[in-house]
Image (cartoon, rainbow, N blue to C red):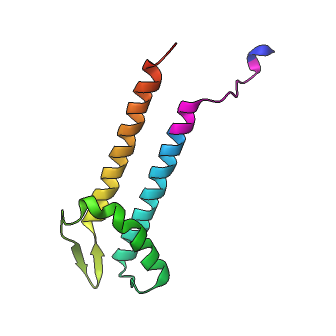
Amino acid sequence: MAELLIDRGYYPSTFVYRLINGLIGIIESAFALRLVLELFGASPSSQFVGLVYGITDGLIGPFAGAFPNFSLGGGFVINITVILAMIGYAILGWLIIKLLSFIFMSGGP
C-alpha cells in the first residue's frame, strides 16, 4: 500500500518552471489578442484596445521596426513585428527554462 502514496512535497524547480510558463503564456496571449485586434482594424481610441496596445507596446519595443506590416486589403493588416515578438518571447522562455533545468539538475549536496 505504501507504494500508492504520492509524494506531494514542495519542489522549487517545478514552481519556477510553472511561473515562467505562466508568465510567457500571459505575454503570448496578450500578443495574440493584439494581433487579432490589429488584423480586424480595431480602433485604438477604444479603452480596451488602447489598454491591450499599451500593455504590449513596451514588450514589442525590442522588435519594433524589424519588418513592415503586411496588408491583406480591405483594412486587414498583419503586424509581422508582433509575430516576431511572439516567437522571440517563446524562445526566451524556453531558454530560461532550459538554463534553470541545467542549474537545478547540476546542483546538489
Is 9 on the left-hand or right-hand side of 40?
A: right
| Res 14 → quadrant | top right
14 is within the stretch colored magenta? yes
Which is more toward the observer, 73 or 14?
A: 14
In the image, 56 versus 3, the foreground residue is 56
Indicate left or right for 58 with 46 as reference: left
Where is residue 66, by image quadrant? Answer: bottom left
Q: Where does the image place residue 11, in percent across and percent down from the top left?
A: 60, 29
In this rendering, the answer to whether 57 lies above or below 47 is above
Q: Position of residue 30 (x, y in %)?
A: 44, 64
The structure residue drawn at horizontal position 26% and vertical position 64%, both measured from the top left corner, is 81
What's the magenta region? 4-16
Which image quadrant is residue 39 in?
Answer: bottom left
Q: Residue at x 37, y 79 (%)?
A: 40
User: Percent x, y for residue 49?
Assistant: 44, 78
Q: Is residue 53 above or below residue 102?
A: below
Picture mark count = 0
Q: Residue at x 35, y 51 (%)?
A: 89
Identify whether 15 is placed above or below 80.
above
- The residue most toward the right is 1
Q: Residue at x 48, y 57 (%)?
A: 26
Q: Position of residue 2 (x, y in %)?
A: 78, 14
Question: Relative to 53, does residue 60 appear above or below in the rendering?
Answer: above
Q: Residue furthest top?
A: 109
Can residue 90 be found in the magenta stretch? Answer: no
Seen from the viewer's position, the closer of residues 18 and 3 is 18
Could you tell me which quadrant the N terminus lies in?
A: top right
